[in-house]
Amino acid sequence: MDALLVVDSISKVHGMVTALDRVRFSVEGGEILGLIGPNGAGKTTLLECLSGLIPCDGGHVLWRGSELPPHRRKEQMFYLPDGVKPYGDQSVKAVLDFFRSAFAVPDEERQKTVKDLSLDSVLRKRIDALSKGYLRRVMLSICLLAPQPLLILDEPFDGFDLRQTRMVMTLLRPLVAAGKTLLLSVHQLTDAERICNRFVLLSEGQVRGIGSLDELRKQATLPHGTLEEVFLALT
Amino acid sequence: MRSPNARTDVKPWFALMRKELRGLMTSKALWVMLILLSPLVGFSFIQAVSLYAEASRSAQEFPDLATGMVPLDGILVPTFGGFYIAMTLLFPFVAIRVIGMEKYTGAIKLLLQTPFGIPKIIAIKLMALLVCWFLTLVPGLSAVVIWQAFGGHLYWPDLLNLLLGQMLYSLVIAGIAFFAASITDNYGTAAIVALSFTIGSWVLDFSLGHKLLFWSGLGSLSLTAALKGFEQGLFALSRALQLLVLSLGFVTLSAVWFHPGRSVYTKTINSMMVLSLAAISFVMAGDARMFKDTTEDRRHSFSPAVEKSLQRIDQDFRITVHLAPDDPRLVDLDRSLISKLQRLIPRVSVVIVEPKRGGLFGAASDDAYGQVFYEYAGRKEQSRSTNPKEVLPLIFGLARLPVPEEQDWNFAGHPLVVDAYPSGIWFYCVLPLLFASALWFTHRW
């Protein structure tokens, strides 16, 4: 597989604290890469740096071998942040219609996404009036409408129960088949193990391991270890 | 794969505009402002009509007094005075929300990944706010309609000029509010920053009548002073352009600070560039020499014959005034003569010579105090008069121009005795109820 995205020595400092310390990894085209780490590992900071939403203190991002400056990142990647409640006073339909129009996506695609995520019953509800689960679904539907080839999702399974998590996974997998690449930040290791092809283990702003589960097992010298055991061994 | 930046169709722009308008229409701040604005404008209007009627009664007995009965001063300016207060103190809350609804909720992270660039996002936001600004005119314009229904006279040029001034003033307030929202993290702090600017501008007004020219000049930079010209029925292109530059300057600064992905260093450098460009544009706009007296009584103009003749003065014309800045004669001279000359003759220079103070009560000890010297083409005249009828012949003599025949312009005035209290039902009950219904309608689900 070709390296779609290369993250080269990204650093970020908050005052005296180093949030990201020369983070390096690459994303291959058509894979689901899991960014694994505990709370506070720097996952969200890394994703926001990558998508150009916060400034980095150092490092480069290469897209198919060429430098991709922050102001052009939105051409290639769409980042779905966690914990955002956009346009609380507006209806779900209005918000989805806005993003559909902004991305110039046909209405059929919006309707399909609404159906896939079972959002029909809340289309006329205000965003502020949604439960956490429905809000997550609305956010996910915005991401599914995005035309960019690389989708970056911060904690996509947060707020979903087991069934819903499986449903989200069944929605994400066909995206890869359709040519998209996914970078998921996940702190639930069992969820990550189920959906991701490769993993980047991040702890205290540093990359502690990169590779498929088998490659990580070799690094951790745990031939039969679970992702959780491998993660604990490497971090 | 489609690139979000590659599209050129206009439909997404409509979507963005629709989103902004929907955001404003579902904003409680807008409807609450309108609910408060109605009685505020209504009270101002009813009081203005009452005072106008009282003065009109005297004018009916003494017709000479009727010349002072001008609806612009008596009705329109006081009515839109309530509007001005609402724009200064309430409109920032509406404008802050336009930026804040994305910045403070995190929705900005989604918006910035759509194909729209920041300048376009901010421009659409400003346009949407302007559309809603027209909604805020409803109480004021309904007062105008009621005034006409009462049989009141309306002179459209001065009304349109006043509305233009209010619009430019509101655009500056919007720019300040946008900037405040873009540099802060919550509504409260943004409101404090925005109100610091607007109320701070009021403080500048106090220095308007200051004895020292520096402070007096500083006072002329206040937003209220900028609006005053429009309220007095004078359209000055320089003032209009300066207000526009101020507004666009603040809006551009808000665009600089809106994106969370730029470093503070980059934002600071860009801000310095914007400020420099705005300062240069502001100064250049001040040189724009186009004036229009929009008043019916032509209070800012000489007669057409006099103006035509004065425009032939093409060399340096110097006026030296020996009066203290706080002397009422200087105000009188400035209003009746100097300002009019400055608007007509391109090369007029005015020097105010402040007197030396002495004596027990600090009275002027200068012998020339009260004198005004007029110099043109090496010739000099002097006068103590502030009356143009006495001074203009001197000026024509200096310029070797024939004194034009004065065509008397008799403005009869528009006195009207009417009781506006019944219109209180509209301003205190019907309009607030309509706006409250709109608030309920937009939040009904």
Image (tube, rainbow, N blue to C red):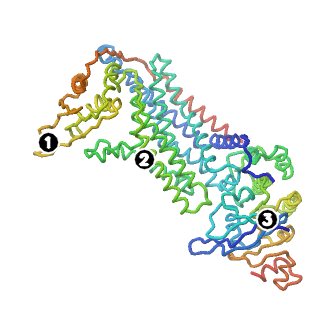
Q: Badge 2 is on which residue?
A: B199
* Same-chain check, marks 3 and 1: no
- Closer mark to the observer between disc 1 and disc 2: 1
| Image mark 1: chain | B
Residue shown at the point (30%, 47%) measured from the top left: B214
Q: Which numbered disc covers residue B363? A: 1
Q: Secondary structure at mark 1?
A: strand
Q: Earlier in the sequence, mark 1 or mark 2?
A: 2
Q: As displayed, is residue A164 above or below residue B95?
A: below
Question: For the residues marked 3 and 1, what is the alpha-carbon distance in whole angstroms?
Answer: 84 Å
Q: Nearer the viewer, residue B333 or B53?
A: B333
Q: Badge 3 is on which residue?
A: A4
* Same-chain check, marks 3 and 2: no
Q: Is B432 situated left or right of B156 in this image?
A: right
Question: For the residues marked 3 and 2, what is the alpha-carbon distance in whole angstroms?
Answer: 54 Å
- What type is the residue that disc 3 sits on? Leu
* Same-chain check, marks 1 and 2: yes
- What type is the residue that disc 1 sits on? Ala
| Residue A25 x/y as whole percent | 75, 72
Residue shown at the point (76%, 52%) measured from the top left: B3
Residue B387 shows in the view: no
Q: As displayed, is residue B410 above or below residue B119?
A: above
